[in-house]
Image (cartoon, rainbow, N blue to C red):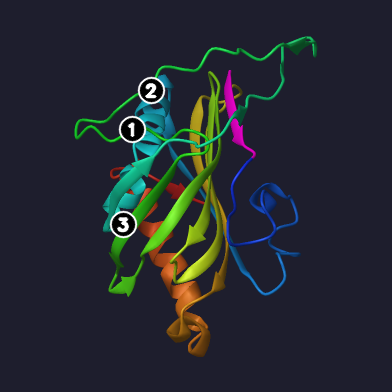
Amino acid sequence: MRRGTFREGTVNYAAVGATSAPDLMHYPPEGSTPAEQSWRIGSGEDRFRHAADALLSWKPQRVAGLQVSDVRPAAGPVYSGVSFDADGNPIAPNRDEPEQRFDAEGTPYAAPGMTLRLHGRVNGMRGDAEIRVISVIESARQVTLVLGTVDDSVVSGEELFDLVWREDNDEVWFSVRAFDTAQSMLYRIVPGLVKRRRRALFGQYLRAISPMYATSV
């Protein structure tokens, strides 16, 4: 398992990690709009591996119509955490930095503490933002990526992307959980745009991860 969580630096919202809370939809951070959805995107290892590669190489954001630029690595140390073996025994974290991966355009894959800029429109709605990678967890059957807003965003908040290859039935599931708080004047005046923007993002994320097959719940 590879695990990383960025501990330093400032995001522009208080509830860091709230996308992992089981009760997010019932008790979101104050003033925010929560959202979550899960899709069955196929089955088998190949489907899982291809989806994981797409997720960590920023394909969901690009398919949504956003340009990825100004990618900067973490400015400080990354907490590697403690993982556990099948018997529940703690495994000391690996102190070696994982090898940095790059996509075909030379953009680094998502890594904890990385900061980047997004620019563009999602279904006609502005999507500009500065984003920080809060955490990345990779294991044999699960990949989880958490992103948080830093500055210059029409909304502030957090997104959690989760890919799971289930052992019991071989199915691969893709889930997104998020909460958004309006920042720009337009989004404050027309609160419905926050939900509309989120629905558009969810649709494009699914298209990026599984363009051919998906069953929603």
Q: Residue furthest bottom?
A: 189
Circle 2 — which element? Answer: loop
Residue 210 visible: no
Residue found 61% across the figure and 12% down from its top: 94
Task: Tell me which label, 3 or 2, sits earlier in the chain.
Answer: 3
Residue picked out by circle 1: 108
**Is residue 159 shown left or right of residue 71?**
right
Residue depth check, mark 3 versus mark 2: number of the one nearer the observer: 2
Q: Badge 3 is on which residue?
A: 64
CB atoms at circles 1 and 2 under 8 Å apart?
A: yes
* Viewer-closest of 19 and 43: 19
Q: Amino acid at mark 3?
A: Ala
* 117 horizontally vs 168: left or right: left
Question: Looking at the picture, does residue 159 appear above or below residue 51?
Answer: below
In this view, the residue in front, 133 or 202, is: 133
Point out the tag, 3 or 1, that comes first from the N-terminus: 3
Q: Residue furthest left?
A: 105
Q: Amino acid at mark 2?
A: Gln
Q: Quadrant of residue 209?
A: top left
Q: Which residue is mark 2?
A: 100
x and y, in percent, of residue 213 in the image: 34, 43
Q: Secondary structure at mark 1?
A: loop
Q: Amino acid at mark 1?
A: Pro
**Residue 100 point in image, percent of width and height:** 38, 22
The residue stretch that appears in magenta? 1-7
